Image (cartoon, helix red, strand yellow):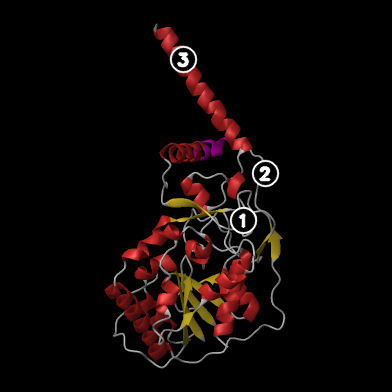
Amino acid sequence: MYRRYNFALATLLLLGFTCGLAATVILDPLDGDLTRIGGFSENRFGWAGTQEKFVPPLAVAGQPGGRYDIVVVGDSFSTLISPDRQHRAGTFWTDHLAALTGLTVGVFDISTTHLDTLVESLAATPPHMLIIETVERFLWRLPDVPGDCRPVTLVPVELPQAAAPAIPQGIRRVVTISPDPRRLAEVMGHIGTALLSGVTRRDINKAALRPLSRADLFSSAEPDALLFYTDDLARAAWTEADWNGIACRIRAIQAMVTRRLGSGFLLVVAPDKSSAYAPYLPPADRPVDAIARLAGFPDIALVRLDLAFRRLIAQGVRDLYLPNDTHWSSAGARVAAEAVLAHGR
């Protein structure tokens, strides 16, 4: 009896290991953050075609006290901020901004940078402009700095257009078959997440999949569906006090940059993926439009990325956001840089 039990157990384990090893060969390597955490297949949602990458990266990791024409304090849309980020160095909108202007761009991680201390360190050689970038769903995490939130007169700064912008190189998504045993644990975990999602029919790890009313906006094998974070929908619970508090923080940052550095200031809010594609989602999955709400505060130096992205999406431009990821493609990153440059003129 025990022999039969042990044989059955060993057979199941061997079968599982064999299936996992086969999957490491059959499945495309994980590339997007949403496919990775939600258990979705890269074969279904991986992007096709070519993206752009600057080699070497043009935007540099900022150092306190460094000399930069433009300082950006941002999140994973602006720079590589954690080891599990899937984006490659040289593909961020900050690289495109450096390419388009020919200026030096120093980028600081908004989650670890003390803005008050950074401004103090830049006072000796202030940048022409300081930009705060945050993704829409994390507006509530903007830095809280000393001072009040009374409006100030902002410093006008015109960013130049480089005579000969840097040329990026093309890159393609990795789909090379690799039987590397080190991928086994990653693939098995991914398969487990996929099975859990399939059985429960629920959003796993805050990764949501919803239908789109258009099927021409992505290059993936399943272009009529959108992957996004369910956290995008949390803004429905934000109160008037929440919005006023966010606006107050922005004004305080503007005042600090203007008074202590004499630099220009811009707020860049990266639209959540579900916000950018909201017109083509089911009504129940359309988030509150935070950028439009902030635009109701006329004294905030806000770049309207939402209008730029929605206009191009309506025109049918594909892959402004990567289908497997919450972030922009290189085309989207360039759109963001161009919008910042246009606002700075």
Residue at image mark 2 = 176
Residue 111 shows in this picture = no
- Mark seen at residue 215: 1
Q: CA distance from mark 1 to mark 2?
A: 27 Å
Residue at image mark 3 = 8
**With 230 as the anchor, is 170 left or right in this view?**
right
- Are circles 1 and 3 on residues that touch, CB within 8 Å? no
**With 131 as the anchor, is 115 left or right in this view?**
left
Residue 342: x, y in percent?
58, 83
Helix, strand, or loop for circle 2? Answer: loop
Q: Residue at x 48, y 65 (%)?
A: 275
Give the residues drawn in magenta, as a range: 181-187
Q: Earlier in the sequence, mark 1 or mark 2?
A: 2
Helix, strand, or loop for circle 3? Answer: helix
Disc 1 residue type (three-letter): Ala
Q: Residue at x 69, y 74 (%)?
A: 166
Q: In this view of the protein, which residue sits in the foreground, 83 or 311?
A: 311
Residue 151 shows in this picture = yes
Residue 170: x, y in percent?
70, 61
Disc 3 residue type (three-letter): Ala
Q: Verify whether residue 246 appears in magenta.
A: no
Q: Earlier in the sequence, mark 1 or mark 3?
A: 3
Q: Dividing the picture into quarters, in which one does residue 260 lie?
A: bottom left
